Image: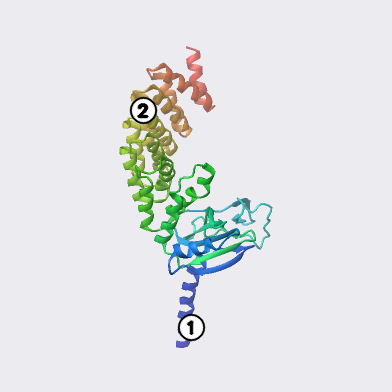
Amino acid sequence: MNITGNRRLRLFSILIGIALPLAAQQPRLSNARADTRSAASGLEQAFKTLVGAQSNAAWIGYAVRAVAGDHQMCCYSSFEDGAGNRCCRGCALESRALEGRGSTPAQIQSVSLEAPGYIFVLYRIEQRQVDRIRNFSAECELDGGGLTVYWLTDVRPAESIALLSLFALQSDQDRREEHRRSEPAIAAIAMHADAAADQALEKFVAADQPQSLRERTVFWLGSARGRHGYEVLRRLVTQDPSERVREKAIFGLSVSREPDAAPAMISVAKNDSSARVRGQALFWLSQKAGRKEAAAITEAVENDPDTDVKKKAVFALSQLPRDEGVPLLIQVARTNSNPAVRKQAIFWLGQSQDSRALQFFEEVLLR
């Protein structure tokens, strides 16, 4: 290849390198009037200008870099193509899914298990105010329902988090309204690949924030915010005075991928002052189903001072995989000194429909 050919190849590679990230920041949009604008001068001002001028229903959206991980936010169909590829019909912005819209073989596309590096945040505007917020992963095709979709480019992550925080902090009396704005705003913030997201979420769980906001946030700390999220949750489960927040924080730890999350849950199951919180910790430990978790649950059956917690620990044993849980339940039914706990173990053995449980019952009845 001559020099000119090499230069052309390098130029082509550069153009492809530019085009692919730009394409990832644009949704596959149909049935909509698309209007692309820049937010380089500031997202808040660009957003307010569009909202203030919009009396009819419309959408405003943009792309932001997402944290690493599998973040599929779309409306998936239940079919596969002939090659076994999972398929996606996409989402209708004006409803929960693209109901009644079929896919021809030419429309079927493989859906990656690892989401692309962007998520889309969309705000529905009507009567010059935000009606709802929706989030989608970048592979999701969107149907605009015949409305205008204003697509903003050049959005800075910190400005997006600041805008979303305004809606996350809204205290709606109507639970349905929280679901339309506050909850998706928190989720979108958690998905941002930016340190400002950690700061915002930590602010949301502060003791002076509304209880409902704190409870909604802890899941996302565990699900999306890695080590920093784990550290915040660990502090909450050990220091927060609210029993309800500690319960929710336990669930946040249960979905965390940090190796230290399970030991933190075990510590709560052993040491929390609230029987209710200890019981919740035992339940979520059972969902992890590891040796350390099973040992902690068994220890609670034997040593927790509260009979109700012991009974919850027995239930947690019933949630373990059968090869782990059934032998432990049989041991409790045989040896525990508390009649109420033995009765609980026998009940869950009966529900297991396991042959080992049947053999145990035969032994007891034929004595």
Q: CA separation, marks 1 and 2?
A: 69 Å
Q: Mark 2 falls on what kind of element?
A: helix
Where is residue 241? Give x, y as percent: 33, 36
Query: Vertical placement of 233 versus 46: above or below?
Result: above
Q: Nearer the viewer, residue 27 or 267?
A: 27
On the image, which quarter does residue 299 sit in? Answer: top left
- Name the residue that disc number 1 marks: 8
Q: Nearer the viewer, residue 174 or 99?
A: 174
Indicate which disc, 1 or 2, sits on the residue closer to the N terminus: 1
| Amino acid type at image mark 2 | Ala
Where is residue 340? Give x, y as percent: 43, 18
Q: Nearer the viewer, residue 87 or 269?
A: 269
Work out whether residue 354 can be spotted.
Answer: no
For the rendered model, the colour scheme is rainbow
Q: Residue furthest top?
A: 367
| Amino acid type at image mark 1 | Arg
Residue 300 circle label: 2
